[in-house]
Image (tube, grey):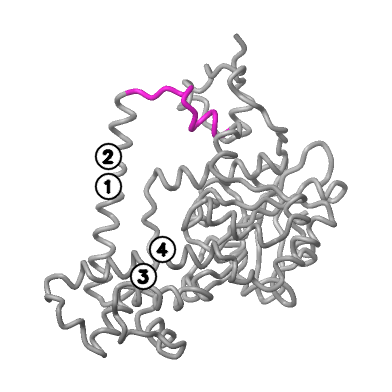
Amino acid sequence: MEIASCRILHTLGINNRRSSKYHQTPLNHLHFPPLLSYTCRKSFNFRGNSLQFKKRLTASGSSLQQNSSQQLAVLLEVEGVLMDVYRLGNRQAFNVAFQKLGLDCANWTEPIYLDLVRKSTGDEEMMLILYFNRIGWPSSLPTSEKETFMKSVLREKKKALDDLVLSKSLPLRPGIEDFIDDACDEGIPVVILTAYSRSSDKIARSIVEKLGEHRISKIKMVGNDEVEQSFYGQLVLGKGVSSSLDEQLAKEARKAASAEKQRIAEEVASMLKLSVDIDTSSPEILKKIVAAQRAGAEFAGVPVYNCVLVSGSQSGIAGAEHIGMPCIVLRSSLTSRAEFPSARAIMDGFGGADLTVSRLRNMNWL
């Protein structure tokens, strides 16, 4: 029986001493994508928009400048990057939820919605509290059931938003199609990550479909199935990797600690009357995000350190930072006031003075 070599595990960034049990994974159960080795580091500066960048670069046998199209890949998230779902559909979804719950007096015009977003800093539960404190809560609603009522509204809102996205009536972000076309024309692999979408893999793929069959045929999509099929997914997430009782107990302990961290964060934010974006992702969620990003690099055929993640979420950025993948943030309605200290650049959109393929080239990431 062939055994997975330590060199391959090192390429994936797995510590051999701590992960020795992975070495016994039978190769006949694994499918190996092209793997590239990395050999060098380089620092650089990009002065556009007064931003500076530093990046570890990788090469395989020749300088990156000599083989640029094969030494750069772009990984795109869906929500916030391909489409600003919450800016375009959230207000409509709230109004649909109000109607389904028989709240005929509740209707959010755009000025009302924007005012609530500003005053609540985007906290949707606080938006409901502010609104119904202003116009009056349903007369038949006991005070003790206000929290249950708000959860019902938010649940119906989510369903309405998902239906709105699936209807394909919402447009993509301006410039995204040209960005993908330019990348493909220059031979840069483009991978769209649907595996850890806020909604679901299915809804994320429905957004991707708006790119059209012509573009989809040139790019790669990495959803849950692709993650499981990837080398990293089979090695780390697959059924063939055994786990001891101690490891299972440690995993449960980490889950409990993360849940307690989330509770404390929400309690402090409530006391201070703030809405804060705190990274309280559980280890399991982070593990899923990391697996999707590593799978994206595998399907692109480019080392992790030469992939650029274009992200619109704190969780995606946390995953990229965890594995050393450089990240560019595209601001959206959900992240307009958030801070991203680990991002290499923060931009407002595609095209013009913002994110373009030529700008990536000029960053000297190659």
Residue 165 position within the rendered picture, expressed as x and y whole percent measured from the top left? 53, 65
Q: What element carries label 2?
A: helix
Up-down relation of residue 57 to residue 50 (above or below): above
Give me the C-alpha separation between circle 3 and circle 2.
Answer: 25 Å
Residue 214 position within the rendered picture, expressed as x and y whole percent measured from the top left? 78, 56
Dot placed on the residue nearer the N-terminal end, 4 or 2: 4
Residue under pointer 4: 159
The magenta segment is 232-244
Give me the C-alpha separation between circle 4 and circle 1.
Answer: 30 Å
Residue under pointer 3: 276
CB within 8 Å, label 1 to label 3: no
Can you tell which of label 3 and label 4 is closer to the viewer?
4
Q: Residue furthest toward the right?
A: 66
In terms of depth relative to the viewer, which is nearer, 304 or 80?
80
Q: Residues within 10 Å of mark 4 (few under 14, many from 20)?
A: some
Can you tell which of label 4 and label 2 is closer to the viewer?
4
CB within 8 Å, label 2 to label 1: yes
Residue 152 position within the rendered picture, expressed as x and y whole percent measured from the top left? 28, 66
Residue kind at label 4, given as amino acid type: Lys
Residue under pointer 1: 257
Residue kind at label 1, given as amino acid type: Ala
Residue under pointer 2: 253
Q: What element carries label 4?
A: helix
